[in-house]
Amino acid sequence: MLKRCFPVIPSRGRNAISKGAVVAIVVVLIIAVVGAVIYSITAPPPAPTPTILTTTIVTTVSTPAPTPILTTQVVVTTVTAPVTIVTTPATPELIKLTIVSASTGGGGYLSTSAIISAIGYLENIVLVHQAGAGTLGISLLAEGKCDIGLGYTGDAIELYQKGFKNIRVMFPVGVYPGQLFTRADSDIKSWRDLNGKAISIGSPAFVANKMFKEIMKVLDIKPREVKELGHEDSFNLLVTGAIDAYFLTALPNPTAQEIAMRFPLKIVPPSPEELAIIKEKLPQFPIFKVDVSKGKVYQGIDLVYESPSDFGWLFGTDKIPQEIGYKLFKAYWENRASVAAKLYPQHGWWTLGTMLETGGIPLHAGVVQFLLEKNVTVPQNLIPPEFKG
């Protein structure tokens, strides 16, 4: 019988296994304790357990009640940067002034045009020049239909006395001396020689018309025919022989200057006796020395004489502010000699003292301001109540 040949493994005792297990368990416990200690020192504290609050809302149905409305108010905070505000000055109001002067063929129109040219450009002021005839300008001014109107001392005094108290003198337009034109071959040598003659005394609106009607009364002149026509029509009748004389006042008169270049004319002055009567009975027409010598005014006429006259002005009212009147007159006066006098020679004749010869009509407040600045003594009766010194 064969024997199994297996190696023989020696067996361990039960006590030996138990002892090893115990040692292992102890080692594990020691490691666990040490780990727990280390964790407790280094680990962050545990977050608290959140508490959930449950609220029960009980609504009683028996009595209807408003449904609660939950509103949420949102507050918005705006952060703004500093803002620089740039303001543009308001544009001054445009001032438009309408001026009515004389007919386009007359000296008053040309003189007014010269004044406007001398004034030139003024910011925010517009001057509109319209032709009129004779005293139409001052009549429209009195009616409130224009801002500045041409008129004469006598007419202004009459309106002032009738209650037009806010009329004001603004610019000198011209002196208007009487000039009696005839053909150069006429036998008329004085004003009374017009008895039985055919004459024209200008349009009814002309200052010459009013003046010569007064002169005819005091000199007892009775013409055969009296026409009331404008410059061009009157001169056409004169040179063709339809009338014997034409009385006018503008100096120089543009139409007369033109006609004198084509036809021989002469001016007949009043006699010394006639002049004395006019001076005594018609003081509203001051005597003025007329110099038309050596053909310097009218071609072919060489004469120096004295004649009744009227003074023409551009009148305004107290509605034109003082500062506007001041600007206008200042601009005119500073350019009077260099501009206005070259366009209309009479502007070279004036002095600031001329502005005081108004017959008692008050000056515009702006004119008073300018005169006082130039050390001109202004009579109290010429200073309007609205003047601010």
Image: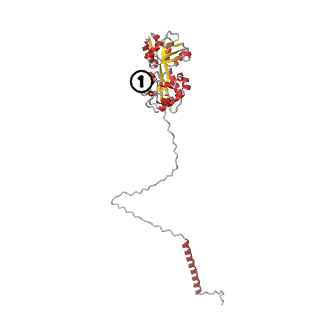
In the image shown, does 72 or 325 lie closer to the viewer? 325
Residue 179 on image: x %, y %:
49, 16
Residue 180 on image: x %, y %:
49, 14
In the image shown, does 35 or 271 lie closer to the viewer? 271
The quadrant holding residue 295 is: top right
The quadrant holding residue 284 is: top left
**Residue 345 seen by the camera:** yes
Crowdedness near tag 1: few (<14), some (14–19) or many (≥20) residues, C-alpha within 10 Å: some
The answer to whether residue 25 is above or below residue 149 is: below
The answer to whether residue 385 is above or below residue 308 is: below
In the image, farthest residue toward the left = 62
Report the amino acid beneath label 1: Leu
**Residue 233 seen by the camera:** no
Residue 3 on image: x %, y %:
66, 89
Label count reads 1
Residue 343 on image: x %, y %:
54, 23
In the image shown, does 373 or 131 lie closer to the viewer? 373
Q: Secondary structure at mark 1?
A: helix
Quadrant containing the N terminus in the rendered view: bottom right
In the image shown, does 166 or 263 lie closer to the viewer? 166
Q: Give the residue number, with chain letter if any, for mark 1.
A: 159
The answer to whether residue 381 is above or below residue 302 is: below
